Amino acid sequence: MGRGRTTALVRQRFRLSFVVLLAILCASTIFLTKQNSAAGMSTTTTPDPTPIQVLYAGKPDLYPEYSHYLEQAFKDNNLNVDLMDNLSSSDPSAVDYIIYNPKSQLQDFSAFTNLKAVFSLRAGVDEEASNPTLRNKNIPLTRMVDPGLREGMVEYVVGHIMRYHLGIDNSWQQKTRGQWTPNAPPVLARQRTVGILGLGELGGSCADALVHLNFQVLGWSRTEKCQNGVDCYHGIEGLTKVLSRSDVLVLLLPNTTETQNIINETTLSQCKSGVYIVNVGRGSSIHEADLLKALKEGIVKGATLDVFQTEPLPRDHPFWKHPHVLITPHIAAKSRASTASTVIAKNIWRCEKNKPLLYVVDQKAGY
Ligand code: NDP
Ligand code: OXD
């Protein structure tokens, strides 16, 4: 046997043993993988991303409903979230996001040192925006823009306007007196003017619904706006025009330094005599003593009030016994867990992907 042939044989054997060794290695890896997965152990080398820590600090009685819809919405958005509602059992510095209602126990945000955002469950964020422990953090605060909230508000506003428009109270009185008095053809919606102060998410939707019912609709906002079928005004001279033309005035304004007591003796004197007022924004918009005086003088014929300067409305407040004031306990519209959860999950997803958050409160404007 020559020397060259011996070397070739050695190389061939070496290659063969290498191939056999590789085959044994592969087989044992497959075997071990099967064993591990049979035992339920993860074989993946990349660890699961750390779950996002979300604290629910809304009304405690609504947590079961919210947790149900939130878990579903997190899943739909592929978010790995640890949702908790118990303040005492969670480490505040680990919390990424807070879902918030200012009526909950949580008032001091100082311990939440790594927060990325706070999502209010309310549309009006006056209490949240003025909380110094939150304001000082300089983290985004979002308000609730929710289809459920919007629908509820439209129904409330349209319902109460229709009560005035159709003279339903008058029908009740006639019925009580056993009176059968057919009136002349009633006024149609197209002959009535509704002014909406605050032409935002909710005011804008109410305006649309009223336009569809043929009412003449005027809208008033802080900045210039344009909305189909609505006569839009802004600024202080715009307000005077809306007041002087409206048969019904709807207030859907946030509570800011500019809107406080905007309905007062002076602005009431600019209203059409016999105006009806529906306040579903914030109680701070109306100077209540001035409204009572305007009701007495007949400038205002009736008021439907859902919000007040002090809530709950104090037991001895003159509104309670006033025959032309209807009171509802701040229930005009509420965020719905089923729809609000989707909005929150979408916003967490956006924040995690470094996309701009939706519905961020402008701290300077206050809403
Ligand atoms: P938005 O922020 O979408 O709209 C607010 C509107 O008010 C905007 O059109 C804004 O003007 C206008 N506005 C604000 N400041 C002034 C000002 N100084 N002068 C004139 N217009 C002004 O809020 P939403 O529509 O979502 O909600 C409105 C309010 O309704 C909430 O802030 C809350 O207080 C109240 N609310 C009450 C509920 C209830 O159950 N009673 C339920 C939900 C909300 P611009 O368009 O130029 O910004
Ligand atoms: C509110 C709300 O702002 O309930 O009043 O959303």
Image (spheres, helix red, strand yellow):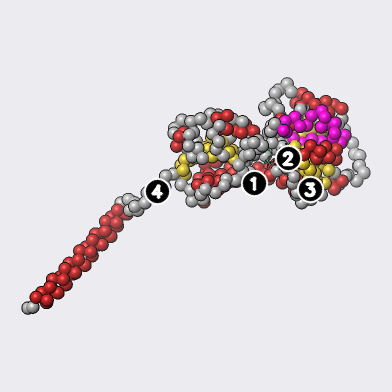
Residue sitting farthest toward the bottom? 1
Q: Describe residue 350's horizontal placement relative to residue 168 as left or right.
A: left
Amino acid carrying mark 3 in the image: Val
Q: What stretch is highlighted in magenta?
A: 258-279
Q: Tell me the residue that label 4 is attached to.
A: 48
Front: mark 1 or 4: 4
Q: Rounded to the nearest whole Å, what is the CA distance between mark 3 and mark 4?
A: 52 Å
Q: Classify mark 1: helix, strand or loop.
A: helix
Q: Nearer the viewer, residue 286 or 333?
A: 286
Q: Rounded to the nearest whole Å, what is the CA distance between mark 2 and mark 4?
A: 48 Å
Q: Nearer the viewer, residue 204 or 276?
A: 204
| Residue 332 - label | none
Q: Tell me the residue that label 2 is attached to.
A: 222
Q: Total number of numbered labels?
A: 4
Residue sitting farthest toward the left? 1
Q: Tell me the residue that label 1 is attached to.
A: 147
Q: Tell me the residue that label 3 is attached to.
A: 230
* Residue 269 image position (x, y, % from top left): 85, 31
Q: Rounded to the nearest whole Å, what is the CA distance between mark 3 and mark 2?
A: 15 Å
Q: Describe residue 148's horizontal placement relative to residue 355 as left or right.
A: right
Amino acid carrying mark 2 in the image: Arg
Residue at image point 82% right, 29% down:
266
Q: Earlier in the sequence, mark 2 or mark 1?
A: 1
